[in-house]
Amino acid sequence: MDFLLTNITEILILLFILITFLQSGLDKVFDWKGQIGWLNGHFKDTFLGSMVPLLVGVLVVLDLLTSVLAIIGIYQLAMHNEFTLALYAAIAAAVGLLMLLFGQRIAKDYAGAFTIVGYFIVVIFGVWLLSNH
């Protein structure tokens, strides 16, 4: 626990990532039909329309992987001052958000795309902070 306060900013960003991506992944797992149904409608007039189940599956894996990396990263930062898996969690989160942003832009959901920007700012700051150690 010696490094908890030393790395508090990084740990708080990882907690933000963990909450965001774990909830997102679990929502997709436990409401698969609802998620697929809504997204089928969202992307029906785009080239992504026929790929919705596959893309949601990829996002589930990425959401849950990001969450696991964040948990391990928090532990490693707090206990060992080790940044590698924390950085990987932040990078995975950034990639996931870019995927969502791409989808929102393709669907011409500009308001939805704009909401992702706030998450991305926090995450990319985490990437920057963690990559400078």
Image (cartoon, rainbow, N blue to C red):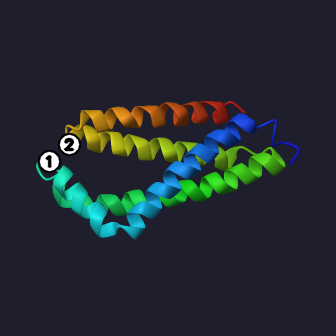
| Label 1: which secondary element | loop
> What's the CA distance linking mark 2 and mark 1?
7 Å
Name the residue type under label 1. Answer: Thr
Outermost residue to the left: 45
| Label 2: which secondary element | loop
In the displayed structure, 95 sits above or below 40; it is above
- Give 23 or 79, whichever is nearer the viewer: 23
In the displayed structure, 93 sits above or below 121; it is below
The image quarter in which residue 7 lies = top right
Please give the name of the residue rendered at 39% of the width and 37% of the height, measured from the top-left corner.
116
Q: Badge 1 local density, few (<14 within 10 Å), some, or many (20+)? A: few
Does the image show residue 62?
Answer: no
The residue indicated by pointer 1 is 46
The image quarter in which residue 16 lies = top right
Please give the name of the residue rendered at 70% of the width and 34% of the height, measured from the top-left corner.
9
User: Are dots 2 and 1 in contact, CB under 8 Å?
Assistant: yes
The residue indicated by pointer 2 is 107
Q: Earlier in the sequence, mark 2 or mark 1?
A: 1
Q: Position of residue 123 (x, y in %)?
A: 53, 37
In the displayed structure, 56 sits above or below 33; it is above
Please give the name of the residue rendered at 68% of the width and 56% of the height, measured from the top-left corner.
72
